[in-house]
Image (cartoon, helix red, strand yellow):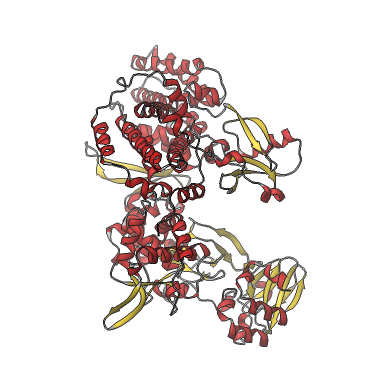
Amino acid sequence: ILTRLREVKAFQRFPSPLLLQICACAFYECLEKGITLFRQGDIGTSWYAVLSGSLDVKVSETANHQDAVTICTLGIGTAFGESILDNTPRHATIVSRETSELLRIEQREFKSLWEKYRQSLAGLLAPPYGAMESGSNHDRLTDKDNMNSDSANKIPSEKLQRGGKVLRNAILSRAPHMIRDRKYHLKTYRQCCVGTELVDWLVLQSACVLTRSHAVGMWQALLEEGVLNHVDQELGFQDKYLFYRFLDDEEEDTPLPSEEEKRESEEELPETILFLAQTGPDALLRMILRKSPGQRTGDDLEIIYDELLHIKALAHLSNTVKRELASVVIFESHAKAGTVLFNQGEEGTSWYIIQKGSVNVVIYGKGVVCTLHEGDDFGKLALVTDSPRAASIVLREDNCHFLRVDKEDFNRILRDVEANTVRLKEHEQAVLVLEKSPRTTTLGSIKYTVISGTPEKILEHFLETMRMDIHHNPAVDDFVLMHCVFMPNSQLCPLLMAQYPFLPELEYALNNKRRATILALRWANTHTYLLQEEPAAISFLEELYGSLSNDSRMLRALKDLVPDLEKIVKLQYDSPMLINGEERLQKKQPIRNQDDILLKVYCTDHTYTTIRITVSATGREVIAAVADKLSTTDELLLIHLSSAGEKQILKPNDVSVFSTLSINGRLFACPRDQLNSVTPLPDQEGPSAGSMSTFELMSSKDLAYQMTMFDWELFSCVHEHELLYHTFGRQSFRRTTANLDLFLRRFNQVQLWVVTEVCLCGQLSKRVQLLKKFIKIAAHCREFKNLNSFFAIIMGMSNPAVSRLSQTWERIIANTIRQVRHCRSQPFNPDICQPNKNQAEVRGYVRKLCVIDNQRALTQLSYRLEPRRT
């Protein structure tokens, strides 16, 4: 029985004595599908936990159980039936959704266990559905009470708990005076730290802690999890003279960490700080949102505004409205799945946006009609129409976070928005929404900004307002670059052709033709070679060229546009035929969507198969090609395996999977049952010896020059649209970002090259010379205005595995600094750098850098070079 219980994740946190007592007193029950375990209103006699299967929770507002509505589903590891603690009737009806296995404990035994192990059992209990508080404003807990109650019951996550222990041990090792007994107003507070000192200490530990507010967010992440606590249980961490205590110091006579624990903490400290640096901004945002609107500073409002820019539900609102919302939005969180936020028929008092988690929308008589997820909003209809709530909202999972805007603020902001908004409607549907700009044009007319609309109306409005007397129009540049986000070329081309009127020689028709042609020219010049991949785009250009040529014979005002359009049409046919991606790189040409590449995909036994696919091939197409090559019918997974052994299962719709590989990453294909057998290849570990002997005789200036030339080749192949695909998700466009990925990969490669060479250099004197060499190369890169490699080298030297080598850095003498200053003062002239006799050798070296991309391996090498000082 004990073995079976430990297979359920929820029971793994229980102490062994509790599990043994459950084994002694619990009963086993198996329910077929559709069996009613008990009904709402019954008197309970037992408590249950789900071992397998699932059960529906149904609630009825009447005595007729046929009206019951399913409000949520209980899965493996959840428990229910806690009404037996106070002998109240059952709050809901429980019906098995499928064949389910339950653990049952009688009332008397459960009460006995509850008295002894209340804290452990509380984490399993499902909320009392019928007696649940709704989320109306007058019943809602304050944010402070809400957070305090959450933190009181919260068990810290393992990673944050370990992070708190590492930071505490590091402080006791490096600055033990920070944790001590302190007196304030005649009261002594045991073993605590000061908020400002914690921020000061954290900022000094790593370059990844960007600002003091960033450090505050990192400490706040620990405070939210209960790893760090204010001595008086205050809500948020503050950069002030306030006392905080680590969880390990809560109990009296806590032993100090041993030397072994201190050593382990020192090794883990860089990774811990990096992890907290990633979680800190979210914790800082939650802390700011918990402040009342009147207490928020200007910096607080900017942080909230930046968050609102990325919320899906607010995408249609202007930035002005988002800034207004930033000053009134309130944070609200609920810990338990099944909590009813508000009930159908209640008065609407707030509008909600889901920041984390998901909710079910429940209508009586219909059950769960839909599920809303992160970024969705609800509750707006009741505020706009001033009508009762049309549905109930029930939390679908634990620990859900919401952004809330109350009715008064909602109406005030929307009323202002409506006053400055113009809507063009067709058949009662808004086809174009414009907002008045606060600035008027130079002619005194009102300027409008497009908020939303159909592609056809947006294009029509844009052409009507486009000025032809400006050679470089930023609005036109923005449109031709960004239109693919909301209007793909397949939609733009026919719409743009429709704006080229086949009308008599009227003045407005002539202006429309010029506008449509000018926009088409700018569009074609922006897309360049990308148009060759779209036959519809080439057909559009040919049709437009034919119409323009015919019209120019009668309309002299169009003749000046014909040569430019003719040149673009000819360019599409004069371009070379498709070649493979490797040849394009060698010829310094950008890689294109339909280019072929050869891709190695490995199996669990480290054999590999080579497949030929297009650059834009999806994960599904790669798997199909591998299965065909291996002649297997098994369902395969496509896995990106890093050198550290981390596995990432690639999705079937992932585009251009080859370009997403890490520097030493490899693609594996295997059945799901062999996933645990996938191990890194020996060559993924990277070099075992440095290459200093190869490049130490090369001139630092030659190395920097060749690095600059290679970086420029990669950068010049990046098309502007790749930045869009990278930002908005290339899956949405079915386009590759291979050129951009190669450029970004180069930055990481140079950075890791510096770390690898330093960590593989065993002699102290050689390492000193090596660091001097890298400093000179970085200085020359700056001289050549190659900030890409310059910052990559600087970040490589700032890597924890390099920056901790204090003995090495102490040997860097002032003469090197003088040399750097001399290089920095020289003007940039690429013609000065004349090719030397080993130019080909230098060029070949900088283009094929061998690196170790496993940070843990680099850190271990660093500690072998210079063990931690005692």
Residue 514: give x, y in percent of width and height.
37, 23
Question: 262 and 28: which one is in front?
Answer: 262
Q: How many marks?
A: 0
Which quadrant, please, contains the C terminus? bottom left
Question: 541 and 198: which one is in front?
Answer: 198
Q: Quadrant of residue 471?
A: top left
Horizontal arrangement in the rendering, residue 613 relative to residue 635 (left or right): left
**Taking 71 as reference, is 63 above or below it?**
below
**Taking 329 as reference, is 13 above or below it?**
below
Residue 116: give x, y in percent of width and height.
59, 84
Horizontal arrangement in the rendering, residue 577 relative to residue 474 (left or right): right
Q: Quadrant of residue 599?
A: top right
Residue 654: give x, y in percent of width and height.
58, 41
Residue 673: give x, y in percent of width and height.
72, 50
Residue 456, visible in the rendered structure: no
Question: 555 and 531: which one is in front?
Answer: 531
Question: 273 and 7: which one is in front?
Answer: 273
Residue 861, visible in the rendered structure: yes
**Taking 647 as reference, is 288 above or below it?**
below
Which quadrant, please, contains the N terminus? bottom right
Q: Quadrant of residue 625?
A: top right
Horizontal arrangement in the rendering, residue 851 relative to residue 367 (left or right): left
Horizontal arrangement in the rendering, residue 367 relative to residue 190 (left or right): right
